Amino acid sequence: MSSDVSRDHALAHGLLRFCLGLNIFLHGLVRLPKLGAFADAIAGGFEGTWLPMGVARASAFLIAPAEAVIGLLVLLGLFTRQALVAGTLLMAALIFGTALKEDWSNLGLQMLYVALYAFLLWNLDADRHSVDGWRRRRS
């Protein structure tokens, strides 16, 4: 691979990782101050499904902090592999809930996030513009 292609590959990976991380980080960050109301709204969406309200509400309390932490790690490129896997698993949990509600249009959007996480993970060898990349170059 030529150095220009390699450089562009690394730049594309870094920009996509940064933007996905920023998106997920802000998803969580803006919900943290209103976590109770957010959890109530999420749990309310499960009325009429077989998921018990207590489980829905308890799970909803975990979403925003998980998004904030995972998003920040992806944004910075710190523990990138683990953060991308965690982000994909968080999306799997959200897909489970979305499918229970039969909210197929949102499930399609969630699958797009899964594709972005998978693409970044698949191209992790291009991860140069990150804290992990900086740490690798120093060692």
Image (tube, grey):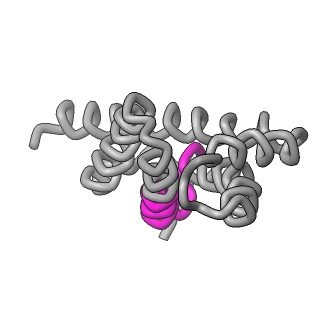
Which residue is drawn at the image coordinates 70% and 53% (left, top)? 60
The answer to whether one can see residue 137 in this image is no
**Residue 99 horizontal side relative to residue 55, left or right:** left
Task: State whether residue 80 is above or below residue 44.
Answer: below
**Residue 124 horizontal side relative to residue 86, left or right:** left
Which quadrant, please, contains the N terminus? top left
Q: Quadrant of residue 50?
A: bottom right
Q: Quadrant of residue 102?
A: top left
The residue positioned farthest toward the left in the image shown = 1
Numbered disc total: 0
Give, as a single range, the part of the protein colored magenta. Answer: 74-90
The residue positioned farthest toward the bottom in the image shown = 139
The residue positioned farthest toward the front in the image shown = 48
Instruction: Name the chief secondary structure element in magenta.
Output: helix
- Looking at this view, is 116 or 105 the one in front? 105
Where is residue 103 drawn, in percent x and y?
A: 45, 36
Where is residue 13 drawn, in percent x and y?
A: 35, 39
Task: State whether residue 21 is above or below residue 105.
Answer: below
Any magenta on residue 26? no
Which residue is drawn at the image coordinates 77% and 48% (left, top)? 39
Q: Quadrant of residue 3?
A: top left
**Residue 38 horizontal side relative to residue 16, left or right:** right
Which residue is drawn at the image coordinates 35% and 34% (left, top)? 108
**Residue 107 horizontal side relative to residue 51, left or right:** left
Task: State whether residue 120 is above or below residue 137.
Answer: above
Which residue is drawn at the image coordinates 39% and 28% (left, top)? 105
Where is residue 126 drawn, in percent x and y?
A: 30, 49
The answer to whether one can see residue 32 in this image is yes
Where is residue 85 drawn, in percent x and y?
A: 43, 62
